[in-house]
Image: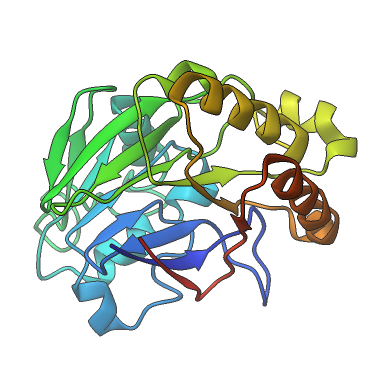
Amino acid sequence: MILKFLGTHNAESKNTRLVSFLIDDVLAVDAGSLVSELTFTQQRKIKAILLSHGHYDHIKAVPTFAFNNSDRITKILATPKTLEILSSHLINGVVYPEFNSEASFLRKATIKLVPLEPLKPRTIQGYKVVAVPVSHPLDGVGFEITSADGKTLFYTGDTGPGLSSAWAAISPQLMIVDATWPNRLATTARAASHLCPQMLMDELIEFRRIKGYLPKIAVIHMSPQHEPLIKRELAEIARSLRISIDIPREGNELIL
């Protein structure tokens, strides 16, 4: 399983991109920067897109992808709430064309909206995908994704404290997790349903208590202005838990 990180931050700039990553070039997870980091040829390899929730920084590139790949239909998979937000607020015939309908100017649909039921496994392009509810607004979910050869990752999506409710349902070898704010802004993180490093440590300790091990950890969705401090705090956690914590940046690849 080869992961290619297109965006790993919560704010967009010349040097940072919104969250999106690819699995083996064919399955996209979130769409904050899905098109701006890929050539047209690379975009054509994508067969399906998973969306964790309906906040703009995770769905932003869906309309552009739909336009760029208008000669085929690509499946967009998410909870009913996320699909409703996408269709009513972004591809609504006003802000962008209704790319999921023949009513668009293209006179055909270029994306198909497919609802996912939480905790119900679904086979998507040969991967077993389970949407797992997490603590974040708009019915946010994470995804446990398992390849045909048994490699398993869990992407938390955006989440705040309370991940332990998901631990019994998953057994990943790799966890891609949110750490948006530094510890000194823990109150802000909690109010926004995100994690800071200390909160992440608490969740990982609970994971180890429930599951008996800790998976590999990769941290994304950091605030660029706080990134140096978050990295130092994550390094302290890694030493305390005796694990390694990867912090991928845009363009990085990770092999599982």
- Point out residue 101 in the picture as x, y percentages from the top left corner: 15, 47
Image quarter in which the N terminus is found: bottom left
**173 up-or-down from 70: above or below:** above
Query: As rendered, which of 251 and 82 lies closer to the eye?
Result: 251
Q: Indicate the quadrant where residue 68 lies.
A: bottom left
Image side of residue 232 versus residue 98, left or right: right
**115 up-or-down from 58: above or below:** above
- Point out residue 37 in the picture as x, y percentages from the top left corner: 45, 76
- Point out residue 223 in the picture as x, y percentages from the top left corner: 73, 53
- Point out residue 214 in the picture as x, y percentages from the top left corner: 51, 38
Q: Indicate the quadrant where residue 12 lies.
A: bottom right
Image side of residue 12 versus residue 171, left or right: right
Q: In this rendering, does residue 160 appear at all?
A: no
Residue visible at 52% across and 56% down?
Answer: 19
Tally of marks:
0
Query: As rendered, which of 1 and 87 lies closer to the eye?
Result: 1
